[in-house]
Image (spheres, rainbow, N blue to C red):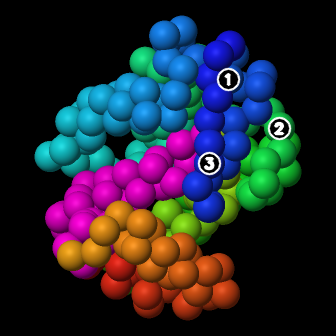
Amino acid sequence: MGLNLDYDDGQTPIDEEEKDGLLISAIATRGELDEFEQQNIEEAVEWVIGKTFKPERVFSEQFVCNLHKRMFNDVWKWAGKYRLTNKNLGINYWEIPTALRQLCDDALFWIQNQTFGPDEIAIRFKHRVVSIHCFPNGNGRHSRLMADVIAQSVFKQPFFSWGMNTGLDSKSARSIYLLALKEADAGDFRKLVEFART
């Protein structure tokens, strides 16, 4: 496969075996890959916009995997399937199903007991699902769309803006995002929630 990719800070490298799952053989660069993936992601966004899903459906392994599949199934053979190797971040791959079930159960508990506000529940879910790192790639984008689905479908709130209203260039906004993620790693979600709504 002629796919040669450079990675930004915080991105997960795709293994050579995973690259074999590329469904469009003409893709050779990161720019081309990003373009095809973005088209596929936009189709997934169209699928979720304006839909109402019960929390029990959103917070399920099936929904989490189905959303990833809808986001990447035109580009990657492994879309919606758990990764089979360990990565530079995330838990051991064989622990993914159990960890994801626990996260879904925890999120339902947070809602039923009003443990956190709506935005924080969405952002805590996003943070934990990306730290599990369920899939070979696309985990960050998937986790952000999951947070959007939770905000819109479960809590009837608008999608998050993910720093689009900061007025900063994408590189500067990404730096702020990565710093907010590190604070969330330490248990403080305030900056990540703030960034998501800015």
In three-dimensional space, the C-alpha distance between marks 3 and 1, rounded to whole angstroms, equals: 14 Å
* Residue 174 disc label: none
115 displayed left or right of 18: left
In three-dimensional space, the C-alpha distance between marks 3 and 2, rounded to whole angstroms, equals: 18 Å
Residue sitting farthest toward the left:
50
Which residue is disc 2 drawn over? 85
Q: How many marks?
A: 3
Which residue is disc 3 drawn over? 7
Question: Looking at the image, is mark 3 or mark 1 nearer the viewer?
Answer: 3
Quarter of the image that includes the N terminus: top right
Tell me the kind of residue under disc 2. Answer: Thr
Quarter of the image that includes the C terminus: bottom left
Tell me the kind of residue under disc 1. Answer: Lys
Percent across and percent down for residue 61 are 57, 43
Percent across and percent down for residue 42 are 27, 35
Answer with mark 3 or mark 1, whichever residue precedes in sequence: 3
For image coordinates 38% across by 72% down, the residue present is: 173
Element under label 3?
A: loop
